[in-house]
Image (cartoon, rainbow, N blue to C red):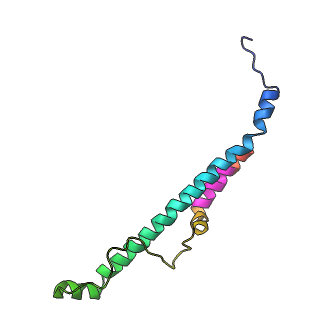
Amino acid sequence: MGGEHRFGTEGAAAHAYIWLTAIVPLVFWLVDGSFRRTQRSFIARVEQLSQYVNSEAFLVAASSGSNIALPLLIMRAKTGRFDDTLLGTMCFLSVALLYVGLATCSRAV
């Protein structure tokens, strides 16, 4: 009992379930993709606001005191620069490599 270690059937039984550790990075990948999708919509809206503030139309509206031609209460926007779907954000190269690598390392143990 003192310094003995048992690697018999208990270790083999636990090893059969080690593939489940690959699921954890995949779940985090889904959550990260969801948050990145939301983040991209805010980035697109900030770009719209920035373009308008730097435009001639804003300068004219600001100097004349007239209404601006951009709705301000819209917080998020869609853009055509990238795929604005969950799968599109999950397949962004750096994100996909991270989570596929983590899942592969988990499975390789």
Q: Which residues are magenta?
A: 95-103
Q: Residue at x 58, y 60 (%)?
A: 95
Q: Residue furthest right?
A: 9
Q: How many marks?
A: 0
Whole-percent x, y for residue 11 in the image? 77, 30
Residue 109 appears in the picture as rendered: no
Q: Residue at x 82, y 28 (%)?
A: 9
**86 within the magenta span:** no
Residue 4 appears in the picture as rendered: yes
In the image, is residue 102 above or below residue 38?
A: above
Picture quadrant of residue 43: bottom left
Whole-percent x, y for residue 25 in the image? 62, 50
The N terminus lies in which quarter of the figure?
Answer: top right
Picture quadrant of residue 55: bottom left
The C terminus lies in which quarter of the figure?
Answer: top right
Q: Residue at x 82, y 25 (%)?
A: 8
Whole-percent x, y for residue 16 in the image? 79, 39
